[in-house]
Image (cartoon, coloured by chain):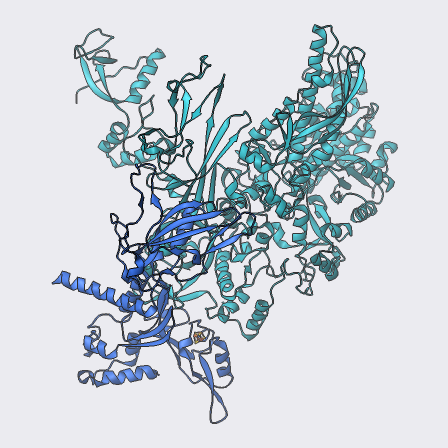
Amino acid sequence: MPKKGTKSKKEKVDDVPNEQENKLPDYLELQRTRVVCNADAPIHTQGFQYSGAFAAMGIDNSVSVDKFCKNFKIEINRLTEDYMEFDMIGIDASIANAFRRILISEVPTMAIEKVFMADNNSVIADEVLSHRLGLIPLDADPRLFEYISENDVPNERNTIVYKLHVSCPKNSQRITVKSSELEWLPEGSQLSMSAPAQSGDKQKTFTSFSQSQKEILEKPLGVKYKDITIARLGPGQAIELEAHAVKGTGNVHAKWSPVATAWYRMLPEVVILKEVEGPQAEELVNKCRVNVFDIEDLANGGKRAVVARPRACTLCRECVMGPNEKQVELRRVRDHFIFTIESTGSMPPEVLFTEAVKILEEKCARVISELS
Amino acid sequence: MTVPTKDDSQSGTVADTVPLPTYRSLAAPVRKPVDKFALLPAFLKVRGLVKEHIDSFNYFVNKGIKKIVEANNRIEARNDPSIYLRYLGVHVGMPSVHVEYNIENITPHFCRLTDRTYSAPIKVHIEYTVGKQHEVRRKNNFIIGYMPIMLRSHACILYEKDEAELAKYGECPLDPGGYFVVKGTEKVILIQEQLAKNRIIVDTDSKGRVIASVTSSTHAIKSKTVIFMDKGKIYLQLNQFNKPIPIIVVMKAMGMESDQETVQMVGRDPRYGDLLFPSIQECASERIYTRQRALQYMDEKVTYPGATNQKEGRSYSILRDVFIAHVPVKNGNLRPKCIYTALMLRRMMDAIVNSDTFDDKDYVGNKRFELSGQLISLLFEDLFKTMNSQAVERMNKNSDKTHSSPLDFSQLIMQDSITFGLERAISTGNWDIKRFRMHRKGVSQVLSRLSYMASLGYMTRITPQFEKTRKTSGPRALQPSQWGMLCPCDTPEGEACGLTKNLALLSHVTTDQEEGPLIYLCYSLGVEDLLSLSSEEIHTPGSFLVMFNGLILGKHKDPQRLVIDLRNLRRSNVIGEFVSIFINEKQHCVHIASDGGRVCRPLIIADMGISRIDETHMEKLRHGTCGFDDFLRDGLIEYLDVNEENNALIALYEHMDQDDVERSSITHIEIEPLSILGVVSGLIPYPHHNQSPRNTYQCAMGKQAMGNIAYNQLFRADSLLYLLVYAQRPLLTTKTIELVGYDKLGAGQNATVAVMGYSGYDIEDAIVMNKSSLDRGFGRCIALKKYTVLKDNYGDGVSDMIVEPQRDNGVLIKQNMRALDEDGIAGPGQIIRNHDIYVNKRTPKNTSKGIGRALRESDYKDSPALYKGVDGETTVVDRVMLCSDTNDKLSIKCIIRHTRRPEVGDKFSSRHGQKGVCGTIVQQEDFPFSERGICPDLIMNPHGFPSRMTIGKMIELLGGKAGVSCGRFHYGSAFGEPSGNADKVADISSTLIKHGFSYNGKDFLYSGILGQPLEAYIFMGPIYYQKLKHMVLDKMHARASGPRVLLTRQPTEGRSRDGGLRLGEMERDCLIAYGASMLIFERLLLSSDPYQVQVCRKCGLLGYYNHKLKTSYCSMCKNGENMAKMRLPYACKLLFQELHAMNVVPRLKLTEV
Ligand code: SF4
């Protein structure tokens, strides 16, 4: 009953000489490596974490670096500018999850944090407008910038300045302000700081750039998507503002999250427990809307259902539902993750992932150094 | 739980691909059972949501006011009747104000912003005499006062304006109107529920006696007549008599000297005779045989005999004018009253013989709803009469004093009395009408603009006539006769539960209709006038009495014929559509009603169970070639009131077999079953799957939900406004939502909800929220608060000053002036913090009068308006409005805006009465996620379901999920499954399966913390969540030591005064029970109002401490010996002193411990 994938793996396991005679019984092996998705609830979701779980049988359940190195594999299935799907095989859920968590909340990006409102008489309130600006993904590589802290002076290394100046002339149609109207100011802020409270002796701006950002950066900065609606302006309304983007991480605010979302799912495994033939096969094939099953013509003219595309299974559980005897079992492979990263655009997804790995590495190094 | 078979799923696909016909998809093919849903929008298009208010007001402005003026159209000087003023006509003009001899038209929005009353001049044409020669003059369009105008009524400038024009006036097209703007606030005159006037109600009183009562109401008088049976004998009770009068005496006094005739009039049934016998006997034992004697007997019982200046005697005039006052007496003929009394007796005895015939006071057919038009007309009549009598008074005084030429009346009429009288009544809600001894409070209320639903809810609300404290259950219970008229769900919880009701979606409240032609018509249809019949003939078997608005019109030999004829006349539009014709077999009566205040609703007429409306009609309706009124005119639809519904057999659907009903006996067909619910409960999806109280809770909560209020919300100047930043339209809608426009002004957001336990911060209905969702704008709201500063004028050119922020060398002298502009008022867009000044005002030190010279700088003192906000929150000045109010003072309105994101403790609710506070906010990465990468916005604990039984919420989740996956809004209208106005669960499930979800909506989720799959499938999908107005920020409060009350020196109370937190009786009890005496001492004394006193051990009175001599001294014993120091609560010391003042001496007896 175990499918191809596992069989090959078991061969590898068999190669290890000292485990040769002690193989886990099938049902335990199933529990160890698969999550079984029954119609009512999934079972064996936890797996066996303890290294000595099968010590009584003489089987070592510990994780060894060698084994990991041998079995770990990454296969990229799809890669576009801002989307990546890859398989991560031979890793524990906790590590895969760590990557996911880091991607969502710890990989830094640039996002608009401060907005200096010079004029806004549109219907949209200043705070809401600022909030909307903050959520716009910027096309700026955060690795080229530094974090800015409370008392730091905004300079060309930690702040990107954008300007938005749109107005809708009187007696004209309403206009929509899109994110493309955000204009990058490589020379820093143009607004002069003349707060009424202080005596404005010298004309200072809100940033102190020592050089133009054009000189530091290879390509001009902008926004990733040009068609995000920021506001709508009626005749006679105008928005004039300056927005300062800084570096931050997603755990502070979702606007700094480099991914729209990042997630994984375990590899589906659909197993036909008992031959399904004839009209029943037809029925089974029709039940699945994502065409997991196919019909195979038998030599004797009969028909048989086979699992053709288990990856497509969305776990709607239609095939295991119903009063009939269980024909199919739905499983998930515990150490095979189909990982998806949807980037918001500041960095391509594959870079994001390496960044995430680097952050995890850094964290581990920190733990080790703390321990030693 | 059934797995849809192949067939099912196919039918599901059909339902998915062919969109269900909505009133928008005009081209949708009509299915076999006629799809009559289009009638609903057609009805609402014609009548609007608040049609009853507007109709009623229109009736008053167009007809009622004319009648009142006509009835009082001549005033004349008392000593010289030839000096007179005559009203020739009256009409209400366009809303306007007088500004410096100019008349300017005004818009409602202008009035809202400038605190004015939206009112129009009442113009009259008058004829009056001038000078000694009594020269007759005429004046047209003479203004006698200003009348507040109901928005969207005939007199309003918004009447029948389209969306673009409304936008020009600054008005929201979705706003239903039906309210007034008085002094800048929007006021609704609530619908008042009352017992029907002029109808006989047979009931039992508190002592268990059978009573028949009539509340008579005419233009001139209101009276209540009660006939009751006590110990077998029947009496009349009337306020004017101090003792009950035997009824036979009353009959005799009205000229029915023959007992036999009395019995005949009641009816020849021997049982009636038996019941009447004791009364007749009693009368005989009093030796009253003649009318003379009877009147004499009654004269003795009159409460206030008063001056009997009339020759006819007190009791006769009472009988004529007060006793069942609505029965008209022509030429002193009391016979109609005799017949009416006999009928009352007959009804009473019917009830005794057969207890089925008792009337039910709570029956909706016995109720009348008084609307704004009627209420204003009462008030106007009173004010108009007062104005006239005042004018006469002045004229008399004038002609008494001066013997010069008498003034003309037109100069003596003061317009203020009507203007102010109306304005005062509507703005305070106190209706005081001396003539009817009417003193009602809370008739009008401020229209709540908390949400769109709240304001709609106000317009349909009906307030009860009873005081709310009564613990009776009868009036609170749901009446079967409420079906389709009043909403069964929408009622508040608590004391007004069941008493305050709301109109259903399609119900309509009638206005008065002309009686004369109807009466004439009845006579020509064969109604015999009773005056031409003998007493014996009144109750001939087979003939029915015909009652018209509570009056006996006559009798008819073939009542069925009469009823059919009248109904046909109504259907062919000869008589008004709201006339009700009801045949009561039990009472042998035909009731015809045309009076105002009855609730009725439209129904499709069916002949022998076959609907008169077929597809061709609906086709025309959908194409707009005919409207609802055409249907009415063509006799396809008619209005039935609650009484007439008793004669009808109404089927829900034409095409469906009714189990125990003969199809041919069906007379009407419902338009849509969802119309039994009201506007507010109409936004609950699948309400028929919920436990009933949950729907009631949602009705209360829907009114507290934040969202969009109106299209003009950002230009309004409400004192407090909550808005949701990103309000959405519900994914699972209902037809009612589309009809009332909730889809355009939503009050909530579609949140992806996972039903699971998480973190333990979700017990007791708390919800766990996703921080990233909040970052992205979920539940974000704006609170706009208005702060008004008045620049006062004190006369003589002395007034307040608004000055620019004072500077020293260009630096502001005070930090809290940073929000101010150069004009001394906070600038729009400025960030304003706690204790900042928003208007830099200075007032003169001496405001009483001018000091004869120009005021100098030093004559003013600072009195800046300080903004009181929450520390650490940034708020922004949204707008500043300057306007002059009605007293020509400058009023400065600063609107300060605060954008808030949800925080722990904010209250949220779904649309199923499931409220909960935010228990904790969790990072997105810790949240579970599905195989598609979907992360819920909030997590709700499953324990919320079993005890609440809100199945509707589960179906909403399923439907919402199917909706997002297939891209079609799903519907969940009440009882809508058979007619296709609600999606069936089976169809929803097959849609879910088609898109790769489990049919039951449960997903396979991974834990965001562990990374492993969760050990159960999680019920997850979108549910429309409302953010309620209760927010922690407005409520949180704590203090250490702080302000104290001056008198008792105890800490102040309440958050607004930075008060202390009370350790109440129950808390105290706990501490006592526990024995924590030191803690009690500390809490109740030390932390409250400790005070040191000197007590004289000898006399036990309080002494004092002499600081000069440094000794204590007892002023009673005149020495300083025996003094002891002790601590008391200051309140205790205060009590002793107060007792002293009352000449009571409290003495303290001290012992050593
Ligand atoms: S669970 Fe659903 S998607 Fe997966 S194989 Fe079964 S039917 Fe197909």
Q: How far across and down, in percent of the image, does residue B249 sit? A: 76, 23
Ligand 1 located in image quadrant: bottom left
Chain B shade in the render: cyan
Query: On the picture, is A157 further left or further right than B372?
Result: left
Above/below status of A217 relative to B897: below
Give the image quarter of residue A72: bottom left
Q: Residue furthest left?
A: A372
Give me the residue at 34% from left, 35% from top.
Answer: B1066
Above/below status of A193 relative to B259: below
Chain A shade in the render: blue
Q: How far across and down, in percent of the image, does residue B749 sit? A: 47, 53
Q: How far across and down, in percent of the image, does residue B407 sit? A: 73, 13
Image quarter of the C terminus of chain B: top left
Query: On the picture, is B1097 further left or further right than B82?
Result: left
Above/below status of B781 relative to B998: above
Give whichever of B653, B1070 is nearer the camera: B653
Confirm whether residue B1001 shows in the render.
yes
Give the image quarter of residue B1008: bottom left
Confirm whether residue A135 shows in the render.
no
Give the image quarter of residue B926: bottom left
